[in-house]
Image (cartoon, rainbow, N blue to C red):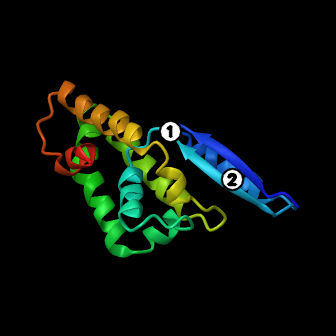
Amino acid sequence: MVPITIGVPVYNGGDLLDESLACLARQTFRDFKVLVFDNASTDGTAEIAEGWAARGGARSETVRALLADAAVLAGLNDLYDREVLPVFDAIGMGEQARAYRKSVIERFRNPFLDHYLADIFTNHAAKKQRRFAGLIALGAQAGLAIAQPRLWAALAH
């Protein structure tokens, strides 16, 4: 049998994604792989992908497995709390950003989905430029003066 891959593009659609994934999980045919393509996360996805690449990029490594490491999760939460949330707080969207992070982490921990770091790493340089530089610019436009050393360092790589 030919393997089946289902691609799910997502842009800030956690509420709809949960329903879509639940529908896929209820299918009687089980021989398929689901790839979720997140288009513009500011939730640490890029940092996860960079860590994967730095470790040699095992094709089978998943975000779920990486997030099982408490130190990795703590580092991502620290990055988000110190360098991302202040921007959203400054523009009045802090609560939405917190809810988004929660939904993304839940989605990544879903045992029925394998978010492969190799897939996330595709076109990584362009994604970082669009997301991180955009977030830094948004903070500057809001008059926010915070250090964002990890976001800047990620842009430099």
Residue 74 appears at what percent x and percent y? 31, 67
Q: Relative to 51, is 86 on the left or the right?
A: left
Q: Is residue 28 toward the left or the right of residue 80 in the image?
A: right
Toward the viewer: 109 or 99?
109
SS at circle 2: helix
Mark 1 or mark 2, which is nearer the start of the sequence?
2
Marker disc for residue 39: 1
Name the secondary structure under disc 1.
loop
Q: Nearer the viewer, residue 131 or 98?
A: 131
* Residue 137, x across and y down, in percent: 24, 29
Residue furthest to the front? 56
Seen from this angle, which residue lies furthest top? 141
Q: Residue 44: x percent and y percent?
A: 37, 53
What amino acid type should be assigned to the residue bearing mark 2? Leu
Task: For residue 14, say whether it is visible.
Answer: no
Identify the residue at image location x=16%, y=49%.
149
Residue 28 is tagged as: none
**Residue position for label 2:** 21
* Amino acid found under the numbered disc labelled 1: Asn
Q: Is residue 65 visible?
A: yes
* Residue displayed at 15% across by 34% down: 144
Query: Which residue is painted at 51% across and 57% down in the image?
Result: 118
Tell me the CA gap for discs 2 and 1.
17 Å
Q: Nearer the viewer, mark 2 or mark 1?
A: 1
User: Residue at point 45% right, 47% down?
Assistant: 100
Q: Is residue 126 above or below residue 20?
A: above
> What number of labels is visible?
2
The picture places residue 146, in percent across and down from the top left corner, at 13, 42
Whether label 2 touches label 1, CB < 8 Å: no
Q: Callout 2: few (<14), some (14-19), or many (20+) C-alpha neighbours within 10 Å?
A: some
Quadrant of the image occupied by residue 14: top right
Q: What quarter of the picture does the N terminus occupy?
A: bottom right
